[in-house]
Amino acid sequence: MKKLDEGKRIFHVMMIFLVIVWGLEYAVAKDALDHVDTLIILNVKYFFGALLIAAVAKKTAGFRLPDKRDVPVLIGTTILGHIIYFYCEYAAMATVPVANITIILGFLPIGSILIEKLFFHRRTNGKLILFMMVCIIGIFLTIGADFRSMRGGSGRGYLMCLGALGAWLAYLFLTEKIAYKYGSIEIALWQTVIAWLLTSPVMVPHVAELPALPPRVMMELLYLGIVSEGLCFLAEVTGLEKLGPTISAVYSNFLPVTSALFGMLLLHQDLVLLQYLGGALVIAAGFLVIREKDRLDLQG
């Protein structure tokens, strides 16, 4: 068990980096959405993300063209994990409080475990489910003591949240199916390029509008592309390849913690004792989920 954990330590560090950056993305994307349409943000994000990933690939082992039999899977996973997921998430931000979105997405690991159990016959146990539920309780506490905010948002916004949840679960398992054939950089590159190509027709009529955007919004778009899409997507695909879909999904539960942290640091939002307690529960329960999942996988 100890050797397994040590061998995966660097990948856990990468996933921690990812949730820190994605925690900041909520604030950045929400501000950018006040000035730019969702699909335009996605296209700019994928363009800069693809440039960065291509540069990384060129400096490392290079990249190969995908097997033509895998192209439909790459297109399908791109549509699920890049187009549908982020479109649903960003669209939900327009009508649903960000805290509520993070709660719904906090059910990702439970959905992942159910899929592993039902369709892949992978081991699970009561401890794993218990730790997951403690994580969910921690998320509820982390979003704040005023639970009246949970009534905020539209029905369409919550459907978008559920759409994002389903799309990301499908993306994790379908990408895992081809991860053994290619390096994580190759998968990240081709999925990002495909996402950029798929969203480009929407972008073409609006290219001339980009220079007129406020400098702050341009910096936000660069952040979303280079850091959030480029660096984080490399971390996400590598983590998926090395840690599996369930553990990768567990890290999404840390997003309310990082979101609350950035709210305190950047937006000067006050945190109450319950929120600190909730953050501690999320981190502790998440660690226990990861440790228990590693133990079950090791036992086969």
Image (tube, grey):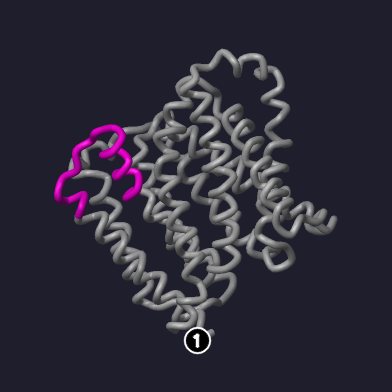
Q: Is residue 268 magenta?
A: yes
Q: Is residue 269 left or right of residue 72?
A: left
Left or right: 94, with 205 as reference point: left
Residue 272 visible (yes or no) = yes
Q: Is residue 69 covered in magenta? A: no
Is residue 148 or residue 245 the one in the foreground?
245
Residue depicted at x 54% and y 70%: 116
Q: In the rendered image of this protein, does residue 32 appear above or below residue 264?
A: above
Q: Nearer the viewer, residue 10 or 233?
A: 10
The quadrant in which the C terminus is found is bottom right
Q: Is residue 207 above or below residue 125?
A: above
Say what secondary structure mark 1 lies in: helix
Residue 60 lies, in percent from the top left, at 70, 57
Per the picture, the main secondary structure of the magenta-coloured stretch is: helix
Q: Residue at x 41, y 70 (%)?
A: 290
Residue on which disc 1 sits:
299
Near-viewer residue (27 or 211)? 211
Number of numbered discs? 1
* Residue 196, quarter of picture: top right
**Residue 134 image position (x, y, % from top left):** 29, 63
List x then y, in percent, for residue 200.
Answer: 71, 30
Q: Position of residue 279 (x, y in %)?
A: 26, 55
Q: Nearer the viewer, residue 13 or 130?
A: 13
Q: Which residues are magenta?
A: 256-276
67 relative to 6, above or below? above
